[in-house]
Structure formats: structure tokens, C-alpha cells
Image (cartoon, rainbow, N blue to C red):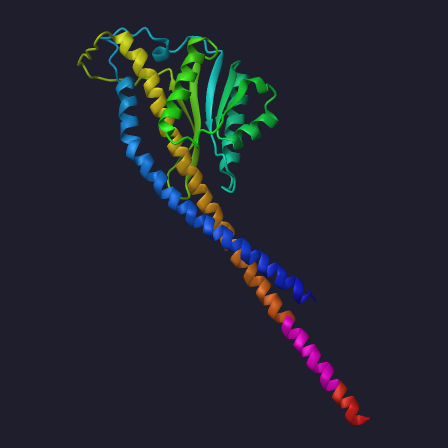
Amino acid sequence: MANLKELKNKINVINSTRKVTSAMKLVAGVKLKKAEQRTNASKDYAVELNRILTRLNQKFIEIKSELFHGRKNVHTEMLIVFSSDRGLCGNYNYLVSQEVLRIVDEFHRGGKNVYIVCVGNKAFFQLKKVIEDTDHIELVDGFYNEKNIVEASMLLARKAVEYFKSNVIDKISVVYTKSYSAINRQVKLNELIPIKCEPTNDKSETVFEPNVDEIIDELIPYNLGIQIYQTALESMTSEQSSRMTSMDNATRNADSILSELRIIYNRTRQYRITQELTEVISGADAIAEG
């Protein structure tokens, strides 16, 4: 039979843990709402800006930029990986890391190298333990702590473009988690450079001032920064969604364990009281008979 004191201590510990997980669930819920608002506020702009580039009618325009067309031979691809700086968000970071490892293995089998840039230290530390060539993986430290994430995204975009122009990399993609609902999230791979052009039947001609090459050379890095920013917001939304779900599950599990422990505690207490009463009655009978 379990000790009453031990049971009471377990109940107190689990009850304290439940209070923490319940509070974290509420905080994650508030942060999730704010993150969704920020994501939705800039989503239309990011989508439309990218769509302008993908729908340029090249029948009327000669674009020379490698950032737009890409290179024929891709030797090294940059993966910008978005995870979190904090834990307690379920399998959010684990799924990102596993998807990156799958992509890296696929690239290596195809004869391509991978340069990984991690936004969020959780994926960075997980991947660094597994990936042999640690010189091809780096961490963007403090990205989420920046007051202006737009500027941080633009800075990262400029860095990626510099790597491209220096022939360190030949392609730029992002790996992130897209949130479709509070319980539905999916890790996705999205190619950003070169631009994935869509077929179009639009016969209108686009006029560039001063000229197409100057505009494209300015617009593509800017678009890259905006897409990185939007991806960061999507990832932050997914992180809070995952944390809220995880803390909700933890709170439910704590409630279930508390319910079981309280039943055991009450049964044990009842057994002890019954045992003591039996001993008192037996003692009284023994004295009466004596």
C-alpha cells in the first residue's frame, strides 16, 4: 500500500506542474493570436510582390540576371531553416530537423552540396550533432530577439545574395513550418532564388525605368527579404500553435494523473482509517474479555 505522505507530495508536484502548463497554454494562445495577425497583415503584399516577378512576360523582356534565371549547374544550395529558440513546443523543432536531414540526404545523392543557415538555435544544435561537415552550417543568432524583424530579414537576404554573387552558393531555398490551423502544421520547402516563373498568356508589355537589369537587381534582393520575413512570421505562428497544443496536452495529462492519484490517495486513507478502527475495536474487545 502506498505511503500517504508520498502520494500527497506527488499530487502537490503534479498540481504545481499543471499550473505552469496551463499558464503557458494561455500565454501561447495570446502570442498565437498576435502572430496570426502579423502574418495575415503582410501576407497579401508578400504574395503579390512575388507574383509580379513570377509573371513577367519574357517574350517582351530580356532579363540577364542570374538571380532571376538561376545557374545551369547547381553545385551548392543554401537552405535557410526556420526553427525556434525555445523548447516546450512539442515536436515542432524535431520535425523541421528531420525534414532538413531528408533534404540534405536527397541533395547529396543527387551530387549537390548544401549550405545550411539556421534561424533559431534548436534546429542548429540538433543538426550540428548529425551533419558531418559543420563548416557548411551556421546560426543567425538573435533573429527573433530583434525589435524589427523586417530589417533582420533584409540583412539575411543581403547576406544570401552576397553568397550567391560570390559563387559560394547557386540556389536559395527556405525550410519552414506552415500553420493551417491550431492543430494542423506542415514542414515545407520553398525555392526563392531563382524565381520560379509561371506560364502567362498576358500580352501586355512591362516598362522599366531606368532599365530592366537595374530594377531586377534591386527588386529581387528586396523580394527575397520580404519572403524571408513572411516565412519567419509563418514559423513564429506555427511555433506558438505547437506550444499551445503541447501545453494543452500536458495539462490534460496532468489532470488525468491527478484524478488517478486522488482516487488512490482516498482509498489508501480510507484503508488506513478502517485498519485503525479495526485495531481499536479489537483492543477494546480484548480488554473487555480480560
Residue 258 in the image, given as x and y percentages of width and height: 56, 60
Image quarter (top left, top right, bottom left or bottom right) of the N terminus: bottom right
Q: Is residue 218 left or right of residue 90?
A: left
Q: Residue furthest right?
A: 290
Residue 261 in the image, given as x and y percentages of width and height: 59, 62
Question: Which of the two residues, 143 or 82, is positioned nearer the viewer here?
Answer: 143
Q: Is residue 47 left or right of residue 286?
A: left
Q: Residue at x 43, y 35 (%)?
A: 186
The part of the chain drawn in magenta is 269-282
Residue 226 in the image, given as x and y percentages of width and height: 34, 24
Q: Residue at x 51, y 26 (%)?
A: 100
Q: Quadrant of residue 45?
A: top left
Could you tell me if residue 196 is visible in this image?
no
Q: Is residue 63 left or right of residue 103?
A: left
- Looking at the image, is 106 positioned above or below residue 265? above
- Looking at the image, is 159 positioned above or below residue 241? above
Question: Which of the two residues, 217 or 255, is positioned nearer the viewer here?
Answer: 217
Q: Quadrant of residue 143?
A: top left
User: Residue 270: within the magenta?
Assistant: yes
Could you tell me if residue 149 is visible in this image?
yes
Image quarter (top left, top right, bottom left or bottom right) of the C terminus: bottom right
Question: Which of the two residues, 158 or 186, is positioned nearer the viewer here?
Answer: 158
Q: Residue at x 43, y 24 (%)?
A: 174
Q: Residue furthest bottom?
A: 289
Q: Main secondary structure of the magenta part?
A: helix
Residue 90 in the image, given as x and y percentages of width and height: 51, 42
Q: Residue furthest left?
A: 204
Count up the numbered dots. 0
Q: Residue at x 40, y 14 (%)?
A: 161
- Looking at the image, is 63 positioned above or below residue 26? above
User: Residue 171: within the magenta?
Assistant: no
